[in-house]
Amino acid sequence: MLLRELACHLMDEAEARGLEGETGMAALLAEKERPGALARDLAASEGQDARHRGSSALVAGMFLGLATGGHMLIEGWHWFICLPFAAAQGLAVGAGFFWVRRHWARLGPVARLAVAVGITTLLSIPLGFTTMHGFKPTRLLYGAFTGYLLERHAQERPLWESILEPVLFTGLMFFVEVGLLGRIRFQWWQVPYELSFNFTLLLAVFGALKLKRLLAERWVFTPQEQG
Amino acid sequence: MDRELLKGSTPLLLLSLLSEAPMYGYQIIETVRQRTGGTYTVKEGALYPALHKLEAAEFITSYWETQQNGRERRYYAIQPAGQAFLKAKKKEWNQFVDMVEAFVGPKA
């Protein structure tokens, strides 16, 4: 990829300067930085970029996992449920999302949102197993909602929208669990538990996005290490 | 021009250019050269690592496009996160310029 880009660059420059044939190209190359040193520096910077991408995705993802897993622990869930939930939410959904997000960066806003929701639904399959009764498909909705929030709030949104989203999602969860699947019987005391969890998820998404942006800003101004 | 004064300005310069339109490497070098009247030139060895860094930070994205003559070019385009970052940094930059001008005086 790097060599392909540099070759294209040389062709563009040769074309712009009207240089043709082997002699023209040789003259152009003679003006350039030493190709060996340039390739070494570029390769080193690529490696550092990949490390930054991986580590920042992991850090932001884990923040998400720890916040939601921590909330469950405070709510009184068993640690052996909270821990795998935090790991699945942080490593699979959060870090996974940040790791693959660049692949749909060029899509339009609606397509981006649809892809983000689809991908995080798939990434949240491990979340489905974080129960004491086998696989729980509604857990995938939390993954989908996380993807929705991460993509939607990558840009600044009005406050009313941010408040409304967890409320609507809470309504959807009860509709699916009580109305559609009949898995649980509706009781009012469950509402604040579900609502507070979804608000924690929203705040965790804000935190993870902010963290990712801070790391990116720091990274952009870090001087390049020589390879 | 004193290179120390330019330190750290390359990412902002690139984001600023890309906020106008998607560009490819050679086009960026040429635009910088023309706009600064040749007083500032970006070398390939500095440009591509800086572009790739901005891409890793998700401030910009890139894509390959085939030209009519069959040749390919890798274009870079700014992303919403890059726009937000640029906006914030422009504000900081203006504050810095105002502060310096308060001592050194504006351009005659």
Image: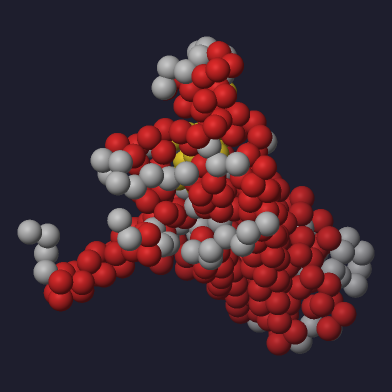
- The count of marks equals 0
Q: Quadrant of residue A183?
A: bottom right
Nearer-the-camera pick, A205 or A223: A223
Q: Is residue A188 visible?
A: no
Decide if residue A139 is on the left or right side of residue A23.
right
Residue A42 position, x and y percent, is 63, 48
- The quadrant of the rendering that contains the C terminus of chain A is bottom right
- Where the N terminus of chain A falls, by quadrant? top right
Write the residue at 42% across / 33% down: B27
| B32 and A204: which is toward the camera | B32
- The structure's colour scheme is secondary structure
Does B31 appear above or below A54?
above
Q: Kindly indicate the quadrant of the structure image that contains residue B106.
A: bottom left
Residue B62's x, y, as percent? 55, 39
Q: Residue sitting at 77 percent across and 60 percent down? A: A92
Q: Nearer the viewer, residue A119 or A53?
A: A53
Q: In the rendering, at what x and y percent does residue A106 appear?
A: 54, 39
Query: Residue drawn 29% across and 37% down?
Result: B34
Between A212 and A187, the one lying in front of the other is A212
Residue at the image position 52 percent from the left and 19 percent from the top: A24
Q: Is residue A129 left or right of residue A6?
A: right
Asked if residue A190 lies left or right of residue B62, the reply is right
